[in-house]
Image (cartoon, grey):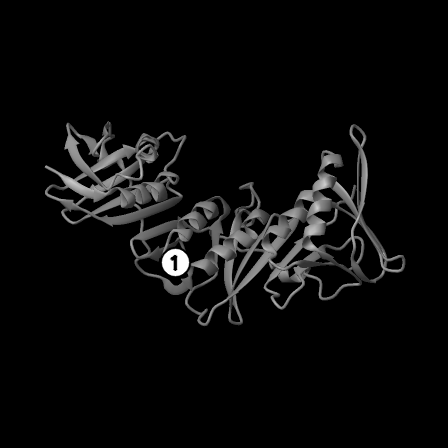
Amino acid sequence: MKCEVQVEKLKRAISLTEKVAGRRTTLPVLSCVFVDIKKERAVFKATNLDLGVSVEIPVKSDWEGVFAVPARTISSFLAQIGDKEQLARLEPISKNLDITLSKSRGVLKTLPPEDFPEIPTVAEGKTISFPSEALVKGFRSVWYSASASNVKPELSSIYVHHDAGFVVFVATDSFRLAEKKVRLQKTAGFDDILIPFKNSSEITRILEAMGPTVTMRSNKNLVSFESGDVRVTSRVIDGVFPDYRQIVPKGYTTEAIVLKQDLMNALKVSTVFSDAFNQIRLTADPKKKTFSIETKNADVGENRSEIDAALSGEPIEVNFNCKYVSDSLQSIEADSVSLQWNGRNKPMVVRPVSGDQTFMYLVMPMNR
């Protein structure tokens, strides 16, 4: 018996599935990649019960069978295979999986495949097609602002909705908020959804490996992203995202426009001297034409960095979490950044200075 598969396709299937498999789980089969071999195709699946992924690749096989192979084992084995290997032969040996190459062979012990749970599919639901690049950009622009705590599930999620020709990605932990708008010709094909933050990094990684167009299907329980031979399915959170538009200032009384790189460099220096709360003080004085960042730590020392800026409005002095400010800069592609304030106790709004106004970041001041 033999099943021949291209090594490159086999490595890709394992790469996309093995990181979804659970590392620490009370159900051992969840740490496995489920392999379903047919005569002309093989399907590789993994799930942690919160997120599931399925990859289908072509094979030439004269036998059929299913296996649950420990993800770490098969991933580590294939990682050592050289680029010169073209074909791998898969065979069942006493319920184990034999993988033979021209100069290497591995017999991988397996677990009972019947214990592997079925990954649900979104058979019925709203459907819409996205450029995969737009989805990746949407997730990457906001994911860091979601709460890492599950106390309020709606805050540990990424909110995806549509608004006036845009698909909008939003995340907040109540201390800062990021919003990214992605223009799409058709936006009426899905309802608002809340995708768990902890699933977003793997979803994004898999989306990057998909084709140029991705189909999203959603219902009240699940959302799936499909393209060609790859499908990833995530549960969605049953909740209501806060009406964040109410806290976004309609205007500002002070603005500082700075080069993004200058601000990044000053923030990096500030972290050396910041305290346990990562506190920095931003001071903008349009009359004196000065904009500075100050930090102080009783155990380390203090620092003051002045940044060239175009200033307007009233003078202001406010404390912020340094990390919260610097996190936003990864989502801004423009060379210049606008920092806007509407009073000392109001949030600071960060936007790119360019024709692209699809990203907005809001960070609350620190009271200390």
**Residue at x-position 69% and y-position 42%:** 268
Residue 332 rendering spot, x and y as whole percentages: 61, 56
Q: Is residue 7 left or right of residue 240?
A: left
The single residue placed furthest to the right in the displayed view is 288
Q: Secondary structure at mark 1?
A: loop
> Is 210 positioned to the left or the right of 148 in the image?
left
Is 328 situated above or below 214? above
Q: In the image, what residue type sits under mark 1?
A: Asn
Quadrant including the C terminus: top right
Measured as percent of width and height from the top left, residue 24 is found at: 41, 30
Q: What residue is rendered at 38% in x and 55% in y?
A: 225
Q: Position of residue 109 (x, y in %)?
A: 24, 27
Q: How many numbered markers are drawn?
A: 1
* Image vertical order of residue 353 relative to residue 273, above or below: below
Q: Nearer the viewer, residue 295 or 348?
A: 295
Neighbour class for label 1 at 10 Å: few (<14), some, many (≥20)?
some
The residue sitting at 57% across, 47% down in the picture is 144
Return the residue nearer the eye: 267 or 188. Answer: 267
Give me the residue at 13% from left, 47% from top: 39
Residue 112 in picture, x, y percent from top left: 23, 32
Question: Which residue extends farthest front?
Answer: 84
Q: Is residue 118 among the parts visible in the rendering? A: no
Residue 132 seen in the figure: yes
Disc 1 designates what residue? 219
